[in-house]
């Protein structure tokens, strides 16, 4: 199953959750479904072709007795298609949809040196001012950018790295000499 398929399942779950007014219930249910997939013993059973659908459904009902009933149906569907291992990705995709619904963006940020909490907050505020939304930062360190920051928010890439600025300066200096 691809990331795109996980997004589709998450989108369908999210639309149902909005329609039912059950955003948090669905979020918790999808997390619980994802949590049970960490049990290798259970996953081996659920992926056994010889085990009937009803037996698999019974195992899921036993472990997920307090989840949203429609979410339980989703877990059964995923198990029947051999895709239950993707429950964690579906849960994460759902969380992103819920954040976007609440006006929260996620930014993948690359910096030259690690950010402390104050630095993350300052950068989050700056990106928030640019987007008009609250921004949660997921930072990675890459010393090759020399300094500054690269940020991806959705489909938008902001490259404020020193390396990028030096490259632009080099191109402009080469152009002057012609």
Image (cartoon, rainbow, N blue to C red):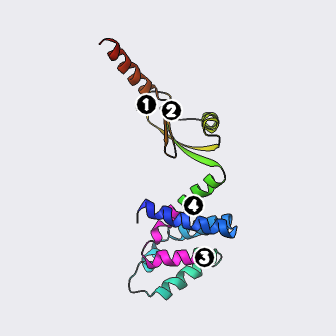
Give the residue at x 46% y 68%. Answer: 85
Secondary structure beneath disc 1? Answer: helix
Q: Are circles 1 and 2 on residues that touch, CB within 8 Å?
A: yes
Residue 57 lies, in percent from the top left, at 52, 83
Sequence-wise first label, 4 or 2? 4
Secondary structure beneath disc 2? Answer: strand
- Judge whether residue 64 can be spotted in this image: no
**Which span is picked out in magenta?**
72-92
Residue that numbered label 1 is attached to: 145
Q: Distance between the residues labelled 4 and 2?
A: 28 Å
Sequence-wise first label, 3 or 4? 3
Q: Distance between the residues labelled 1 and 2?
A: 8 Å
Closer to the camera, 176 or 94?
176
Q: Are circles 4 and 2 on residues that touch, CB within 8 Å?
A: no
Closer to the camera, 56 or 168?
168
Q: Is residue 167 above or below residue 136?
A: above
Viewed as shown, does residue 110 lie left or right of 121? left
Quarter the N terminus occupies = bottom left
Closer to the camera, 41 or 12?
12
Q: Which of marks 3 and 2 is in front?
A: 3
Q: Which mark is residue 94?
A: 4
Sequence-wise first label, 1 or 3? 3
On whether residue 7 falls in the magenta region, the answer is: no
Q: Is residue 174 above or below residue 117?
A: above
Residue 77 lies, in percent from the top left, at 49, 77
Q: Which mark is residue 149?
A: 2
Secondary structure beneath disc 3? Answer: helix
Residue that numbered label 3 is attached to: 70
Sequence-wise first label, 1 or 4? 4
């Amino acid at each position: 199953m691809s990331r795109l398929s996980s997004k589709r399942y998450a989108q369908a779950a999210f639309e149902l959750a909005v329609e039912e007014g059950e955003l948090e219930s669905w979020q918790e249910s999808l997390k619980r479904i994802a949590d049970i997939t960490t049990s290798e013993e259970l996953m081996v059973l659920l992926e056994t072709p010889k085990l009937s659908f009803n037996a698999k459904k019974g195992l899921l009902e036993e472990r997920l007795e307090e989840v949203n009933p429609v979410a339980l149906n989703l877990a059964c569907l995923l198990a029947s298609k051999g895709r239950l291992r993707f429950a964690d990705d579906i849960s994460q995709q759902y969380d992103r949809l819920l954040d976007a619904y609440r006006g929260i963006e996620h930014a993948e940020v690359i910096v030259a040196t690690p950010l402390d909490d104050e630095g993350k907050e300052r950068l989050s505020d700056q990106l928030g001012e640019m987007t008009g939304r609250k921004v949660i930062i997921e930072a990675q360190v890459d010393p090759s950018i020399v300094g500054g920051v690269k940020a991806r928010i959705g489909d938008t890439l902001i490259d404020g790295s020193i390396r990028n600025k030096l490259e632009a300066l080099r191109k402009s200096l080469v152009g002057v000499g012609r």
